Amino acid sequence: MLTMEDIIRDGHPTLREVAKEVSLPPSNEDIQTLKSMLEYVKNSQDAEIAKKYELRSGIGLAAPQINISKKMIAIHVKDEAGTQHSYTLFNPKIVSHSIEQSYLSSGEGCLSVDEAIPGYVPRYARITVKGIALDGTEVKLRLKGLLAIVFQHEIDHLNGIMFYDRIDKNNPLKPIDNAVPIDR
């Protein structure tokens, strides 16, 4: 079981690397790693388990955050309508996106960043992501709202980008022009 001890913190060089593609079909080790990443995210949202194991709550995790520089992400989050979504993907990539942008009105956080960094993070309002599921099948997802934001945050990790890199340094809380605020 992954714990907070397994998550590397801001400043660690792996967080700034471009992760490598996962060889397909994925190895048993890669499959187990991805399963344990999803298990961490799910456990971190369960109040009893999170307290017992001192887990910080998260909705997504990318392999570089556990010091594995491979393109793997796990996401477990409820959308704006309260519907639960769980995804595990190898080699996810954004294949198309809207011109329209969105952002989390509360700002973004990260399991690898201990302090709160205020500011709006511009993201695409709608994206299409392709990747490989745990069973080796290709998946194509059309996402919007919170789900689109979470996927962009995790895919950024695979490219060595941290969420705060996207915040306007001069005016972090300036509303983003023509962007839809997403409440969480």
Image (spheres, helix red, strand yellow):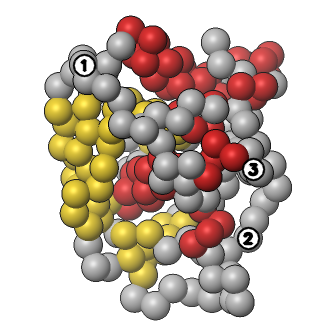
User: Along the polypeptide, which appears first: circle 2 or circle 3?
Assistant: 3
| Viewer-proximal residue among 140 and 84 | 140
Q: Mark 2 points at which residue?
A: 118
- Report the disc number at residue 51: none
Query: In the image, is 120 to the left or to the right of 141?
Result: right
**Is 106 above or below relative to 39?**
below
Check disc 1 and report its element: helix, strand or loop. loop
Q: Name the residue under label 3.
A: 10
Q: Where in the figure is residue 138, as x and y percent of width and height?
A: 17, 33
The residue under label 2 is which amino acid type?
Pro
Q: Name the residue under label 1.
A: 25
| Viewer-proximal residue among 21 and 168 | 21
Check disc 3 and report its element: helix, strand or loop. loop
As drawn, which residue projects farthest toward the top?
28
Q: Which residue is drawn at 38% across and 9% down?
A: 28
The residue under label 3 is which amino acid type?
Asp
Q: Which residue is drawn at 56% across and 49% down?
A: 17
Q: Residue at x 57, y 72 (%)?
A: 166
| Viewer-proximal residue among 27 and 110 | 27
| Viewer-proximal residue among 65 and 37 | 65
The residue under label 1 is which amino acid type?
Pro
- Residue 168 shows up from this direction: yes
Q: Residues within 10 Å of mark 3 (few under 14, many from 20)?
A: some
